[in-house]
Amino acid sequence: MTWKSKLAQAGIDLISRLGLLRSYRFFYRASGYTEEELKRPLIAVANTYSESTLGHMHLDKLGEAVKAGIYLGGGTPIMFNTIGPCGGYAREKAFTTRAMHYDLPQREAIADAVEIQVKNIVPDALVCIGTCDKSIPGLWLAAARLDLPTIFITGGPALPGKLDGEETVFPTEIVGKVAQKVKARDLSLSRARQTLSACEACWILTAGACPEMTTANTVQIATEVLGLCLPGSSTCPAVYNEKIALAKETGILAVKLARSNLTFSRFVTREALLDAVRVTGALAGGTNGILHLLTLAREVGVNISIDDISEVLNYTPLVGAFRPSGPHHLIDLHCAGGVPAVMKQLEPLLHLNRSIVTGDTWEKLVRDVQPDERVIKPATSPVKDRCAIYVLKGNLAPDGALARPTVEGALMRIKGPARCFDNQDDAIAALIAGDIKPGDVVVLRYQGPRGGPGFVENFQVVLVAGFFGIKNIAVISDGRFSGATTGCLYVGYVSPEAQAGGPIAVVKDDDLIEIDVEKGSISLLVEKEELYQRLQAFRPKPPAVTKGVLADWYTSATQFHEGATLVRRIDTP
């Protein structure tokens, strides 16, 4: 050893003996942490609590319960907050609100924020607390990047409200019912306004996710299927005392996970992701859930294609009829046995030998489960032999699209002339003016990841069509659709999108379009050469925004079949 290397080694020994590499202790001790606390495993708690989100307004209490559990388990909690907005709060009067452009981008913002915060803490484990449809997937993505021992506690569904003696779970169903009564002259305009005003504060009764099979509950359930939270916890209503106990147990288990070093990637495998896809289909979950699972697969480096998803869905029965696709709501699902009961009913179709965060396998967990078959049917005698989510492909969507027929007797096939719109407001105006006729195919484009930008939700078009009793039409979009969407045939997530030069960009008014949901096909009926010439002449639109978060989406967002995300992963040979 040379004199220089001896000197260097002596310096390293001195630094080690003095504890100079433990300077973080100065900051923790100055923040009020005790010596005893710093001897324990440090558990980061990422919370999406917010006062302006129904699904998140109670998460401060869940966070405190998680912290209590961490202390009970012998760890030290470090809780921080990140965003968790809900587009329903946007104070804009247009149908197409600018807030909807920021809806999906919050997922990436949450993932980035949690990743950065946790990398600056360097904890031994991570607890994620979220409820709604972008917050939980954002936490998924952050957890995938960090690959720490990780456990989730979800906010759970709200308790439903009531209108005319019927339980209510989402504002649009109330507006729709009132609009239909006004149209039928069963209700005056003044009385309709009074009814809507009275329902504003009581369409649901508590904090929590809207208690139907919207995306929020879809991704909460998927979290449990993936094995990332306590069994039965994802459907437990937000305000049940049971939820507080589950949060404490989550904290205790987080410390055990820290000591076992079982990380996120140990649970989020190809089998787990495909099981989550199957359960999403079996419950007619929101189509956004499929998008988020695709994104997560890419984040963890698991190769799952849209064709893989189609294969799973094609052989998945519908075992539960939950609103908006049936009579039951999420509280019914929880009382019928929750996710373990669903897993039991789908047992022959799932990979139940997988372990979850408790250390148990799903096989063991469902062994003695007895589902309430009035709510959750067995796979051998399901609600329907084939689930309600379909992957469609064809020359109009070469890389795939999604449809979810949500009502009994829904239109499954159509061949009609295109009516093209480059924004949602124009499409809605045409519906209201009576310019859309039965048999028409509304083509709504420049709503995708780059074209929106931000991958806008377009459920308002379907909503307005329902208000005016227009049913025998189809709506095709390169945007997304809310899990609350119900009514006419809708096909979204068309990939590639218009902005990226997908065929949807060059559809012209009166072009014939044919959709066959059961066959999984969506076709623009023009000659190949004509379509080729149109695509050659296509030029993308200039940006609708030039600064801020959405500029990033315009320039670099990937397509739906690639997860519709910002690039946060570099694949190396």
Image (tube, helix red, strand yellow):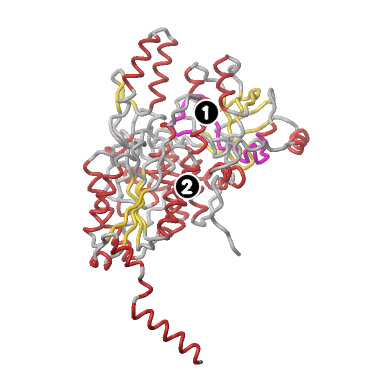
Which residue of the protein is positioned furthest toward the front in this rendering? 30
Residue 163 percent location from the top left of the image = 31, 20
How many numbered dots are placed on residues in this image? 2
Residue 282 showing in the rendered view: yes
Residue 306 percent location from the top left of the image = 56, 45
Magenta-colored stretch includes residue 490 = yes
Determine the CA span between mark 2 and mark 1.
22 Å
Which three-letter amino acid code belongs to the residue tagged 1?
Thr
Which three-letter amino acid code belongs to the residue tagged 2?
Ala
Residue for badge 1: 96
Residue span colored magenta:
482-504
* Secondary structure under the numbered disc 1 in the rendered image: loop
Residue 567 percent location from the top left of the image = 56, 52
Q: Earlier in the sequence, mark 2 or mark 1?
A: 1
Label 2 environment density (alpha carbons within 10 Å; few <14, some 14–19, many ≥20): many
**369 w.r.t. 190: above or below:** below
Q: Which mark is residue 503?
A: none
Dominant secondary structure of the residues highlighted in magenta in the image: loop
Residue 332 showing in the rendered view: no
Label 1 environment density (alpha carbons within 10 Å; few <14, some 14–19, many ≥20): many
Side (left or right) of 396 relative to 217: right
Say which of 442 and 388 sits in front: 442
Q: Image quadrant for the C terminus?
A: bottom right
* Secondary structure under the numbered disc 2 in the rendered image: helix
Say which of 487 and 46 sits in front: 46
Q: Which picture quadrant has residue 423?
A: top right
Q: Which picture quadrant has residue 429?
A: top right
Asked if labels 1 and 2 touch by Cβ distance under 8 angstroms, the answer is: no
**49 w.r.t. 228: above or below:** above
Say which of 162 and 414 sits in front: 162
Residue for badge 2: 109
